[in-house]
Image: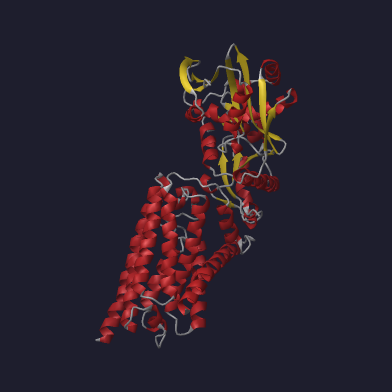
Amino acid sequence: MSYLKRSPWVIHYDASSCNGCDIEVLACLTPVYDLERFGIINTGNPKHADIFLVTGSVNEQNKEVIQNIYHQMPEPKVVLVLGICATSGGVFRECYNVSGGVDKIIPVDVYVPGCAVRPEAIIDGVARGLAILEEKHKKFQEISGGKGELVITEAAIEDAQEILDLQKLAYQSEAEIYNDFSLSPLKQSLEELREDFKNKVFLKSVMHGKIVGSVRAYLEEDTCHIRRLIVHPTYQNYGLGRKLMRRVEAKFGQAKRFETFTGHKSRRNIYFHQRLGYKIFKREHVSQLRDRVFMEKPLKKE
Amino acid sequence: MNIFLNILLYLVLAPLTGGLLAGLDRKITARMQSRIGPPILQPFFDVLKLTQKENLVVRRSQNFYIGFFLVLVIFTGALFFTGKDILLVIFAFTLAAIFFVLAGFKASSPYSFIGAHRELLQMMAYEPVIILSAVGMYMVTRSFYVSDIVSFSRPLIYYLPGILFGLLYILAMKFRKSPFDLAASHHAHQELVKGITTEFSGKALAMIEVAHWYENMLVLGFIYLFFARLPLAGALLSLLAYFLVILIDNTFARVKWQLALLSCWLVTLIFGFGNILVLFILRK
């Protein structure tokens, strides 16, 4: 049994815009609505919080603040965006300084539109967030307890949309490292990804009918190029990536060497590949923000 | 045999009562603000939830200190409720608090640093009156043993009203309540984030919470000592003291640390030390 539902602690951040929604959130804590009767506490400390409430649209200045708060919250956590500005940017969406809704920079679980959002709607949103919190908690127990069964198979073109969604989620952390949200994996369209299916082999790892990881690869001369290894953020650090790499290497058993690349600041990716026997052999300049580090693994001679 | 039973009873009952009292506190506070408030069992839900959260640390060792803090608080309470030397109780209690402060420093964030500093200031403010209360109890009962103090022929309040007042004055500090809620900033969370507990999450925070329940029971036990001759009245009056702290918490704003320190020392000096002086002169 989980107690997350009985005691959700929230942290509230007001990003920008008019503060109308901000005030409505505070109204929820007053005697009229009294959120505390559900065990909800407004903590003001990300490390104590389970639910992240964001009001207002995202602009260039508070982008990092929101990401920072999000990353400081211990799992399982849920993000609620309150009001139309936080949902999509609202009337400010075309302003030169506004990036749009909160989901442009962190994964959002519940959208509560409104201008200003009503306290009743906020309470309803939190209640929906609790169900998601519960679900995430179950997932964690499954992965950490090794209960969830993982199936790795070749992906078909019908999986394109799901893989694309996952790719955009998984590459968020990379984009944050370089503060560059124009990375090609984030910009890829469904058509482009469908094109990829023609010349690349896609592997997917599925848990409970949902794709939680994927990798693609193709053979060129005697070299197998491995591209875009992605694992759902919730499922990272449980060895899913390693399993995918092993499988793709086995699939291209005829290759003489394997090659992949990552960004120069992506220390975790580099370390991950080094653990699998890859070595850096080339560095290439791609943009002002980023260098591309190429890693290779020659196949053992029998 | 008997002592083991006592310790076992204490280990189970102290956190249960402490948690229930914390729940009651939140309910009463809510009612004072004309809100409905959370269920009485809310503090237990909170702690159980915290055990299900991810363990997020700045440094791994910070949770080790918290573990020591919890163990020492439990040890202190065990000494107290089995009627051992009250000086040992006070020193073990101080040591426990020191481990809490160390944990705050170890987490090395500006907020927990300020919180830890303030916790040290609070200790400076409340320690004198606690030590004076041991001195006063010894002067009256001629023993440092809690078991002897409890079985003294008359309630200690007859001899030590000033010291009891001093203890009541610092009570808000030990319960982490306004106006002396400086270190953990329980209510004014926007100012110091969460003070000394800022960097603790998940199981470590749950441990702090449970340690706090044990701590509260110990402090209420201290108040009880003054009425120990009349057990029922003693229990009721300690609960009344708890209610008083809640009432003050809801009616007073937080003070600055200078005022907290100064007023605690003044009250200790005038009422606590004055009480001892009068006792000394009368005994002569």
Residue lying farthest to the front in this orientation: A302
Residue lying at 46% horizontally and 60% vertically, measured from the top left: B178
Does A194 sit above or below residue B119? above
Number of callouts in the render? 0
Q: Is residue B267 visible?
A: no
Residue B250: x and y in percent read 52, 62
Query: Closest to the observer: B230 or A207?
Result: A207
Residue A48: x and y in percent read 53, 49
Q: Quadrant of residue A77?
A: top right
Query: Closest to the observer: A222 or A165?
Result: A222
Asked if residue A126 lies left or right of residue B121, the reply is: right
Does A21 sit above or below residue B85? above
Query: Closest to the observer: B125 or A212?
Result: A212
Q: How is the image coloured?
A: secondary structure
Residue lying farthest to the right in this orientation: A158
- Image quadrant occupied by the C terminus of chain B: bottom left
Q: Is residue B281 visible?
A: yes
Does A180 sit above or below residue A148? above
Residue A275: x and y in percent read 49, 30
Residue lying at 54% horizontally and 43% vertically, measured from the top left: A73
Residue B185: x and y in percent read 46, 54
Query: Closest to the observer: A102 or A161?
Result: A161
Residue lying at 51% horizontally and 33% vertically, measured from the top left: A64
Residue lying farthest to the bottom in this orientation: B153
Residue lying farthest to the top in this orientation: A221
